[in-house]
C-alpha cells in the first residue's frame, strides 16, 4: 500500500495516481487529518504497530501493508471533525495533531520514501549542495553568506554583477501589501557602497551573476533523469531573462526536451545517492561558452508543468518507483 501525503489543492499527485493502475494507495490530505481520517500508533512489549484509515472510503494503510511513501507538501492539520467552541482548546487540539503528525512522518524512515521531511530538510542547505557538487567536479556559481561587511565588499569587488538571494524567507507580509523577496540582480557597486551597518544587520547571501546561453531544470527520480531546456534568454529583462520564473508566470517561456552530457546526467544520480534522496529538481545555467554551472537542487521542486510542456513522462517514473518501492 502506497501512502501519499499531500493537501487537497495539490494537483501533482493526480497524474501519478493515474499511472498507478491497480496498485493500492491512500491519499492523505493532511489539513483534514482530524476531520477525514483516523490514525493510531502503539507500542507494547517491543512490538510497534500503527494504522491510518480514511473516513470517506474506508481505505487503510498499516505498519503491515505499507510499501512506500510519497510526501508532497503537506499542510498543518487544521480542520476538526467536531466544532470546539473554546478557541484555546481548539488550538490545543490542532497543535497536538500537528506535532504528532510531524513525529509520525519522521518515524516512517525505514520505508522507501520520496520527500522524507528529515532528509529533505538537511538537503535544502545550499551549503551542503555546493559541497557535494564540488566533490563531483561540477562548477558552482561563486557565493558568499556573511554579515562581515569587509568580506562582502571584497566578494563584490571580484564580480561585475551579483544576485542577492533569500536564504529562507521569500516574502514579507505587511498589513496593506505583500513583498516578494526573490533573487535580485544588482551592480556590485551597490554592495561596495552600502553602509557597514546595513550589511551587518543579517547574514547576506550573495552569488555571482552568471551569463547564460540558456537554463536547465533537470527532474530526477532515482535513476530516471528528465532534462528540460528553458529558453530564458529569448525573453526581455522584465519577463524572464533574469529569472525564468517570471517567464513561466506570463506564459512566454519556451521549453524543450534536452539531452544532457553524460557527466551531468551521472552527477545528478550520484548527487541523490549522496544525499540519500530519491527525488530532486536541479537548476543549472549553461553559459555562452558551454560551461554547466550548478545553482541548486530543490528537494521537492515542482515538475508537473514540465511534463505538460514537454510530454516527458515524469509522473510515470514517480509511479514506477513508488510501486517498486526502491531504485
Image (spheres, helix red, strand yellow):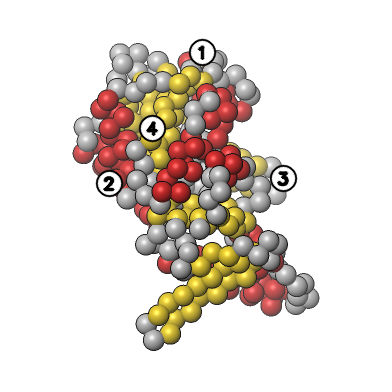
Residue at mark 2 to residue at mark 4: CA–CA distance: 16 Å
Q: x, y percentage for residue 286?
A: 36, 20
Q: Secondary structure at mark 4?
A: strand
Q: Secondary structure at mark 2?
A: helix
Name the residue located 55 percent from the left edge and 75 percent from the top edge: 40
State whether residue 246 appears in this view. no
In this rendering, which labeled residue sits more in front, label 1 or label 3? 1
Q: x, y percentage for residue 301?
A: 48, 40
Q: Please indicate whether residue 246 sits to the left or right of residue 89 in the image.
A: left
The first of marks 2 and 4 along the sequence is 4
Residue at mark 2 to residue at mark 1: CA–CA distance: 35 Å
State whether residue 113 appears in this view. yes
The first of marks 1 and 4 along the sequence is 4
Q: x, y percentage for residue 273?
A: 29, 45
In the picture of the structure, the residue carrying the numbered disc 1 is 234
Residue at mark 3 to residue at mark 4: CA–CA distance: 43 Å
In this rendering, which labeled residue sits more in front, label 2 or label 4? 4
In the picture of the structure, the residue carrying the numbered disc 3 is 176
Crowding around mark 3 (Cα neighbors within 10 Å: few <14, some 14 to 19, many 20+) is few
Q: Secondary structure at mark 3?
A: loop
Quarter-wise, where is residue 67 in the image? Answer: bottom left
Label of residue 225 in the image: 4
Residue at mark 1 to residue at mark 4: CA–CA distance: 25 Å
In the picture of the structure, the residue carrying the numbered disc 2 is 274
Q: Is 214 in front, or is 177? A: 214
Name the residue located 43 percent from the left edge and 85 percent from the top edge: 44
Residue at mark 2 to residue at mark 3: CA–CA distance: 45 Å
In this rendering, which labeled residue sits more in front, label 3 or label 4? 4
Q: Is 24 in front, or is 245? A: 24
Name the residue located 70 percent from the left edge and 62 percent from the top edge: 56
Amino acid at each position: 500500500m502506497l501512502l501519499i501525503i499531500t493537501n487537497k489543492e495539490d494537483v501533482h499527485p493526480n497524474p501519478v495516481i493515474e499511472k498507478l493502475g491497480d496498485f493500492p494507495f491512500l491519499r492523505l490530505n493532511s489539513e483534514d487529518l482530524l476531520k477525514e481520517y483516523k490514525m493510531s500508533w502503539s507500542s507494547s512489549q517491543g512490538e510497534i504497530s500503527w494504522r491510518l484509515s480514511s473516513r470517506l472510503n474506508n481505505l487503510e494503510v498499516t505498519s503491515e501493508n505499507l510499501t512506500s511513501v510519497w510526501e508532497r507538501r503537506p499542510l498543518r492539520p487544521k480542520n476538526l471533525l467536531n466544532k470546539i467552541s473554546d478557541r484555546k482548546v481548539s488550538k490545543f487540539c490542532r497543535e497536538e495533531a500537528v506535532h504528532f503528525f510531524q513525529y509520525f512522518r519522521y518515524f516512517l524512515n525505514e520505508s522507501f520514501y520520496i520527500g522524507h521531511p528529515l532528509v529533505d530538510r538537511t538537503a535544502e542547505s545550499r551549503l551542503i549542495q555546493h559541497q557535494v557538487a564540488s566533490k563531483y567536479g561540477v562548477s558552482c556559481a561563486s557565493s558568499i553568506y556573511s554579515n562581515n561587511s569587509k568580506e562582502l565588499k571584497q566578494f563584490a569587488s571580484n564580480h561585475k554583477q551579483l544576485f542577492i538571494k533569500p536564504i529562507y524567507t521569500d516574502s514579507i507580509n505587511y498589513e496593506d501589501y505583500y513583498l516578494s523577496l526573490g533573487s535580485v540582480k544588482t551592480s556590485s557597486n551597490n554592495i561596495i557602497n552600502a553602509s557597514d551597518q546595513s550589511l551587518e544587520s543579517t547574514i547576506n547571501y550573495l552569488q555571482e551573476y552568471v551569463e547564460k546561453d540558456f537554463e536547465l531544470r533537470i527532474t530526477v527520480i532515482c535513476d530516471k533523469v528528465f532534462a528540460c531546456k528553458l529558453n530564458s534568454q529569448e525573453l526581455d529583462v522584465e519577463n524572464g531573462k533574469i529569472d525564468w520564473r517570471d517567464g513561466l508566470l506570463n506564459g512566454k517561456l519556451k521549453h524543450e526536451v534536452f539531452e544532457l552530457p553524460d557527466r551531468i546526467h551521472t552527477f545528478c544520480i550520484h548527487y541523490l545517492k549522496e544525499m540519500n534522496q530519491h527525488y530532486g529538481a536541479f537548476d543549472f545555467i549553461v553559459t555562452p561558452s558551454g560551461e554547466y554551472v550548478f545553482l541548486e537542487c530543490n528537494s521537492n521542486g515542482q515538475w508537473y508543468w514540465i511534463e505538460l510542456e514537454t510530454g516527458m513522462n515524469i509522473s510515470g517514473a514517480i509511479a514506477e518507483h513508488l510501486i517498486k518501492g526502491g531504485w
